[in-house]
Amino acid sequence: MLLDEKLFEKFGVEYASNEIIFTEFEPGNEFYFIQEGRVKIVKIINNTEKTLDVLEIGDVFGEMAILEEEPRSASAIAMDDVKVLKFHRDNFDSLLQGNPQLAYKLLVIFSKRIYDAKRRLMILLLDDPQLKVMDVLNMLTEHDPQSDLGQPVTIHVTVQEVANWAGMQVNDVQKVLTHFNKLGKIELYNDKVIVNNIRDFQRIVTSKRKSLTR
Amino acid sequence: MTGGTMKPASGITTRGYKSGSIIYFEGDKSEYIYILKQGRVILTSNKIEQGEIVETKEEIKPGEFFGVKSSLGKYPRDETAQTVGDTIVLVLTLADFETLVLKNVNVVKKMLRVFSNQLRKIGKINREILGEGGATNPEVELFKIGEHYYKVGRYKQALYAYKRYMEYYPNTQYSDMAMKRINAIQSGSTDSDVQTDFEVETAVSDSAADEAKFTDFTLDEGDEQKAPLNDEFDLGGGGVESSLSSEMDDFLSDDSSDNLDDFSFDESSDAASGAQDVSTTYYDAVNLFSQGSFSEALSQFEEILQVKTLKDNAERNLFEKTHFEIGRCQIKLGQYNEALKSLSAMIKKFPKSEYVKIALFHIGLAYEMMKNADKAITYYNKVASMEPKDQINKQALKRLTVLKNKENV
């Protein structure tokens, strides 16, 4: 959803490619709507900048600032020339009052974020590296509701990304995926994984998860 | 599933359930959103507590929504909804829900706060499991972000982090270091020894170093390239002031002086401040100036004048320089009369200062901006005749040429 021009006049900010919009650990008081360009969300982990997400037109970021000031949990960096709407927490109420569409949009975004965060947590709580990797693939399959689970499923993901989701080292993920590849459960490519029987993965993870539940 | 029949997705419908009915199961996919009208509904879900999955139950009160998140997010239900006692619910499609909330922004606001809270909690648990949470100190961590980008040579990003650090956490553990990094990046000397203490470095940045930099500047061709701009100078136009002043900016960044025999304390002060305060405030102000935030820079510089005790020569130097900087800010802000006052006061207070010449030049500049060409010419002439001959003399001569050409037209 693109908001109207008047909002951009009042709240619009532009960033050049590679410019930092905010950085991890600085206090956060504003949240942003992308109107143009892409923004990457990164975190410095073990002296490496890891990309957690790439956001595009219509996406929102920095939304945790809506509630109260808290240090940013990640950095936002412009990937292109980026136009955003930047809203301060103090204007939030009046902003929503005047823009119920924005309010609705935020509600949808929050719903998705909460689900994603919970879903990720479910992966992290698995204690077995193989299960974690399987469940990352399950989760990514869920992201595409169109996919036919009875057929081999193609998931566009790199080993690095799987490692990020699983909270594992890339090497360990590589080992697991190579193992699955040998067993014929998946076909492993540089930029994608084809899972031959995703329902199998779902069943294995679900049964393990049930046994974990008290 | 028990209960009344579901109508096609148009308009809000009412549905009755007998006790113990399941409205939906965890894992179901559906876009319906419910409002409890009468009776009781229990939501059963798996929550994470202390790293374990625990089955939790939550009761919905009449008037409350449920099934909102999974419907909006188009995800499977993450809880099971079951009735206790005879229950009536309102069933909304996504479109119904949208229409409803657009008319009741307050409901959305409430929901957003609840969601935001939930997201924060989950995020915290996630970070704890990944070992990223716990007792981190944002102040130190922010500085470390700067260090990371600095060390990998991404100076733009590093600069951002250091500046934020100075903004939010001035006068803390790493502020000297952050300031030193900012200066290194801005002066392009990022490969300098990172261990050098900031104050020591300032103290030793004496004439030798400055002369070297001045030599570099003299050889700079940029001067000639800018000349045609000045020739087209129009007193009414604003463009020239900036081109001129930006040339002057180049001088000023490297100036320093250790000749402060006639230094006197400023009377109007309320607090004694340490060396850190003066240098931090000074460089903050210089940064603001370079970003074009002249009034902010001005008020920062004015703060320095409030400092009562100056620790060493480095601080005295900055204090003296500050007087000149204030005049320069005022010129940028178009406060020419104030600038004239500040600059004359500075020359009176520090008559032997190395900044006298550049202050005189700026007085000329202020007069020129005020369209007082005669006064401007007087000051530029004075500057042009002053020893040693350097870039400032050249600038003054250039202004004189421009002004004289104007007269002849």
Image (spheres, grey):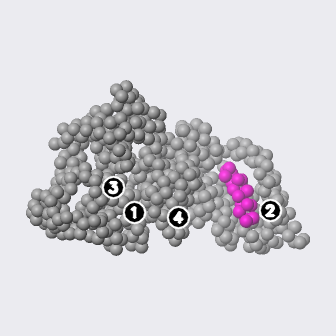
Q: How many marks?
A: 4
Left or right relative to A195: residue B22: left
Q: Are marks 2 and 4 on the same chain?
A: no
Residue found 37% across the figure and 38% down from its top: A152
* Residue hosting label 3: B74
Q: Which residues are magenta?
A: B239-256
As drawn, the label of residue B157 is: none
Mark in the foreground, 1 or 3: 3
| Image-quadrant location for residue A67 | bottom left
Q: Disc 1 marks which amino acid? A: Lys
User: In this view, which residue lies farthest toward the top?
Assistant: A182
Q: Disc 4 marks which amino acid? A: Gly
Cα–Cα span, label 2 and label 3: 64 Å
* Residue hosting label 4: A12
Cα–Cα span, label 1 and label 3: 14 Å
Cα–Cα span, label 1 and label 4: 18 Å
Mark in the foreground, 2 or 4: 4
Q: Are marks 2 and 3 on the same chain?
A: yes
Q: Are marks 4 and 3 on the same chain?
A: no
Mark in the foreground, 1 or 4: 1
As drawn, the label of residue B230 is: 2
